[in-house]
Image: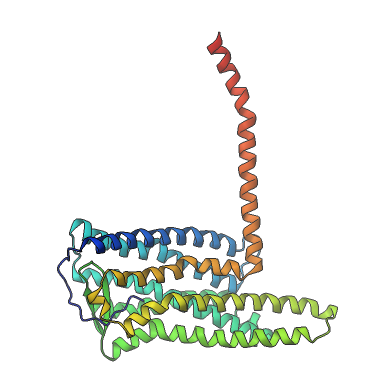
């Protein structure tokens, strides 16, 4: 989340950057926009892969698809909006009003918080599947998954609205580059920060450790057990659940790597927000990589998704080849009369 503990005012004068910083800012805008575009394409493709077209949608499929959708929203809306504000400020000299920062940050923080809680919901789903397999179908139905999705949006919006409308527990800081950030204050601010970031990360991290423990335990059990026909179907179900669990574990680790620069800067180097406001923007690019390339983690760690992706790509290639062949077969018939008319 784009939280900052810097001492910033509600409005700052526009800074005229040195040439080197202007070039760095241009490079940041181009790089982050490229990451956003790649993220849009990745998330759309993975959404096509993860959404079951021919099968009945399950609870975990619904949660995974929703997780991809909220990542897509960040790449499609939230990231370009923050870049547009900087372009508006630096190239057109238009500094947005301080109050507008509350609404811009509301869009960003709600979206990021829903991603965090969606990840926690997925880890919880896999925890139940691995540790309570006999109760999984009863506890984790499609309706329960839909309730988790709706509940995450209601909670994040409900927690964020008092901070946006009443401006309690935080204040807005608007940098000279046009970047908005929220400075949390007091007990309400600490609750806000914990609910939106630390609690879902703690849930995801703890659940991932339990998932990792189960993965190792199941591998040892499977290697030392004699396989019988009666166990084949049960082992196949357990393998699918473990595969999804490993996928979520790697997703959590990837998210941690992408978020680490931001949290290190906030905790250890908060003065960089004031002294080097251009270079600090690269931490947001690292965050953008989380939302843009998480779909790649889903594909690389799930064999079923890779098979679906190959089928989709093969189908598109076949359609393209068929269209090209059809066009080639029609071209001589339409071009010969034209040639005759020119000769004649």
Asked if 128 appears above or below 321 in the picture, the reply is below
- For residue 225, say whether it is visible: yes
Coordinates of residue 324 in the picture (x, y in percent)? 61, 37
The C terminus sits in image quarter: top right
Residue visible at 27% across and 70% down in the picture: 103
The picture quadrant where one finds residue 332 is: top right
Q: Depth check: 183 or 192 in front?
A: 183
* Image height of 332 relative to 88, above or below: above
Residue in front for this viewpoint, 20 or 163: 20
Quadrant assignment, res 11: bottom left
| Residue name at image x 46 percent, y 65 percent | 292
Q: Position of residue 94 (x, y in %)?
A: 18, 60
Q: How is the image coloured?
A: rainbow
Instruction: Identify the residue at the far bottom of this view.
Output: 187
Kindly tell me whether residue 141 is visible in this rendering.
no
For the N terminus, the quadrant is: bottom left
Q: Residue at x 46, y 62 (%)?
A: 39
What residue is rendered at 43% in x and 86% in y?
199
Above or below 264: residue 60: above
Farthest residue, direction top: 344
Q: Is residue 231 left or right of residue 324?
A: right
Residue 68, image x and y in percent?
50, 67
Q: Is residue 86 left or right of residue 114?
A: left
- Seen in the picture, residue 334 relative to 155 is either above or below; the reply is above
Number of on-image labels: 0
Residue 6 pos. (x, y %): 24, 81
Nearest the viewer among 166 and 130 is: 130
Looking at the image, residue 273 sits to the left or right of residue 255; the answer is: left
* Residue sitting at the far front: 20
């Amino acid at each position: 989340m784009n939280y900052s503990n810097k001492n910033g005012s509600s409005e700052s004068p526009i800074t005229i950057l040195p040439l080197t910083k202007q070039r760095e800012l241009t490079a940041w805008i181009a790089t982050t926009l490229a990451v956003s575009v790649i993220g849009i394409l990745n998330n759309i493709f993975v959404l096509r892969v993860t959404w079951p077209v021919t099968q009945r949608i399950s609870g975990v499929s619904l949660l995974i698809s929703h997780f991809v959708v909220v990542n897509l929203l960040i790449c499609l809306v939230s990231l370009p909006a923050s870049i547009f504000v900087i372009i508006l400020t630096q190239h057109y000299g238009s500094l947005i009003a301080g109050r507008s920062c509350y609404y811009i940050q509301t869009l960003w923080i709600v979206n990021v918080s829903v991603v965090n809680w969606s990840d926690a919901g997925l880890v919880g789903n896999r925890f139940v599947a691995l540790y309570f397999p006999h109760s999984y179908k009863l506890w984790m139905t499609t309706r329960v998954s839909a309730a988790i999705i709706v509940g995450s949006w209601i909670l994040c919006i409900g927690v964020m609205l008092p901070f946006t409308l009443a401006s309690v527990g935080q204040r807005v800081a608007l940098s000279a580059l046009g970047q908005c950030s929220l400075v949390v204050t007091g007990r309400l601010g600490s609750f806000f920060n914990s609910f939106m970031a630390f609690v879902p990360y703690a849930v995801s991290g703890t659940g991932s450790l339990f998932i990792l423990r189960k993965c190792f335990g199941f591998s040892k059990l499977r290697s030392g057990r004699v396989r019988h026909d009666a166990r084949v179907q049960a082992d196949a179900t357990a393998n699918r659940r473990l595969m999804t669990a490993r996928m979520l574990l790697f997703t959590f680790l990837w998210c941690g790597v992408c978020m680490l620069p931001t949290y290190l800067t906030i905790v250890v180097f908060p003065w960089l927000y004031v002294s080097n406001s251009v270079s600090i923007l690269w931490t947001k690019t690292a965050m953008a990589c989380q939302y843009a390339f998480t779909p790649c983690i889903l594909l690389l760690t799930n064999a079923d998704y890779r098979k679906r992706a190959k089928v989709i790509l093969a189908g598109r290639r076949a359609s393209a080849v068929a269209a090209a062949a059809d066009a080639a077969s029609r071209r001589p018939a339409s071009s010969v009369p034209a040639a005759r008319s020119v000769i004649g």
